[in-house]
Amino acid sequence: MTTVIPHSELVKRAAAWVAEHRAEQPSRPVTDIVDEAGARFNLGPMETEMLLDLFRNCHNDHIQE
C-alpha cells in the first residue's frame, strides 16, 4: 500500500536534505544540490526556486556577519 505524503512535508524533507548535503559538501554549488533535491523529492519549479532562494539567502547572511 502506498502512503501519500503531503506536498508541504516533501518540501520540508527536501530543505532538510539540502541543509545536510550543504554541510557535508560545502564546496559543491548550492544550485546542484537544490536541483538534485528537486528531482529526489519530486518538487515543481516553484518549490525548487524557493529552496534555492532560501539557501542562497542563508549563505549570503553568513558571509555578511
Image (cartoon, rainbow, N blue to C red):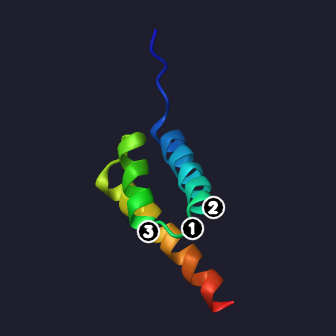
The CA span between labels 1 and 2 is 6 Å
Q: Nearer the viewer, residue 11 or 29?
A: 29
Tell me residue 23's x, y (percent): 63, 61
Callout 1 secondary element: loop
User: Of label 3 and label 2, which has the lower sequence position?
Assistant: 2
Which residue type does callout 3 highlight?
Pro
Tell me, yes or no, whether the two marked residues, 3 and 2, touch with CB atoms within 8 Å. no
* Neighbours of disc 3 within 10 Å: few (<14), some (14-19), many (20+): few
Q: Is residue 19 left or right of residue 52?
A: right
Q: Residues within 10 Å of mark 2 (few under 14, many from 20)?
A: few
Q: Which residue was labeled with disc 2?
A: 23
The kind of secondary structure element at disc 3 is loop
User: If the image is split into quadrants, where does the C terminus sit?
Assistant: bottom right
Could you say which is closer to the camera, residue 25 or residue 9?
A: 25
- Pick out the residue farthest to the top: 1
Amino acid identity at mark 2: Ala
Q: Between 8 and 15, which is closer to the camera in this rendering?
A: 15
Q: Is residue 64 above or below residue 23?
A: below
Tags 1 and 2 touching, CB below 8 Å: yes
Image position of 50 with respect to 13: above or below: below
Quadrant of residue 20 within the rendered picture: bottom right
In the picture, the disc for residue 26 is 1
- The location of residue 36, given as percent across then percent down, is 39, 50
The type of residue carrying mark 1 is Pro
Disc 1: CA contacts within 10 A as few (<14), some (14-19) or many (>=20): few
Identified at 32% across, 49% down, the residue is 44
Q: Which residue is mark 3?
A: 29
Check if mark 1's residue and mark 3's residue have beta carbons within 8 Å: no
Q: Position of residue 42 (x, y in %)?
A: 36, 40
Question: Which residue lies at the image location 58% right of the left edge and 74% below the top edge?
Answer: 58
Q: Secondary structure at mark 2?
A: helix
Q: Is residue 58 above or below residue 25?
A: below
